Image (tube, rainbow, N blue to C red):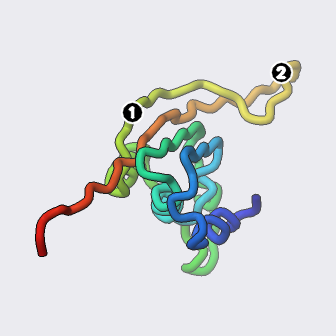
């Protein structure tokens, strides 16, 4: 998947509530706008669906200098969780995992990440049964 594909593909109306689980592995920090990614993940999950994430928040566009529309929204982990709660998620499990990414285990050079791992569940939308 190339930069921008996630937003384009999963913003399609056919994706609304289409998924039981979304797994983001070393992914959410690829967003220019992480809030948009979280909104899309919430929209494409069924009620009660699960979002599993593993990865750092390195924000791939952080050091880019260019036009204003190329700017990046870079939230802290705590802010990412707050935004997720706003979009109807409940945090079920969270921890930091020390891990590698595309590393040769026999290499003398090993990059290590302290990655955010969580599972969040999308709260079911409660129907309003009051008379209008």
Q: Position of residue 12 (x, y in %)?
A: 60, 72
Precedes in sequence: disc 1 or disc 2: 1
Q: Position of residue 83 (x, y in %)?
A: 37, 54
Secondary element type, mark 2 = loop
Comparing labels 1 and 2, the label whose residue is closer to the camera: 1
Image quadrant containing the C terminus: bottom left
- Residue 35: image tag: none
Q: Is residue 1 left or right of residue 35?
A: right
Mark 1 secondary-structure assignment: strand
| 128 versus 82 height, above or below | below
Residue drawn at x 37%, y 38% as measured from the top left? 91
Is the residue 112 above or below the residue 90 in the image?
A: above
Residue 6 vertical placement versus 113 (above, below): below
Q: In terms of depth relative to the viewer, which is nearer, 65 or 29? A: 29
Q: Quadrant of residue 8?
A: bottom right
Whether residue 73 is visible to the viewer of this picture, yes or no, is no
| 62 relative position to 87: left or right | right
The residue lying furthest to the left in this view is: 131
Is 44 situated left or right of 77 in this image? Answer: right
Residue 26 location (% of width, % of height) = 65, 43
Image quarter of residue 3: bottom right
**Label 1–label 2 contact, CB within 8 A:** no
Q: CA distance from mark 1 to mark 2?
A: 32 Å
Q: Decide if residue 5 is on the left or right side of residue 71.
A: right
Q: Which residue is found at the position 46% from the left and 62% from the top? A: 39
Q: Which residue is mark 1?
A: 92
Res. 33 in view: yes
Quarter of the image for the N terminus: give it: bottom right
Residue 18 horizontal/vertical position (percent): 56, 57
- Picture residue at 26% right of the left edge, 59% below the top: 127
Residue holding disc 2: 105
């Amino acid at each position: 998947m190339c930069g921008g594909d996630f937003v384009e593909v999963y913003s399609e109306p056919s994706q609304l509530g289409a998924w039981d689980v979304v797994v983001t592995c070393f992914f959410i920090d690829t967003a220019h706008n992480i809030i948009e990614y979280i909104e899309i993940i919430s929209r494409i999950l069924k009620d009660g669906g699960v979002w599993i994430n593993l990865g750092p928040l390195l924000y791939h566009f952080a050091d880019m200098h260019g036009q204003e529309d190329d700017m990046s929204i870079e939230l802290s982990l705590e802010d990412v969780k707050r935004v997720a709660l706003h979009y109807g998620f409940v945090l079920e499990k969270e921890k930091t995992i020390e891990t590698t990414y595309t590393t040769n285990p026999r290499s003398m050079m090993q990059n290590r990440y302290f990655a955010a791992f969580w599972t969040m569940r999308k709260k079911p939308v409660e129907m309003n049964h009051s008379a209008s």
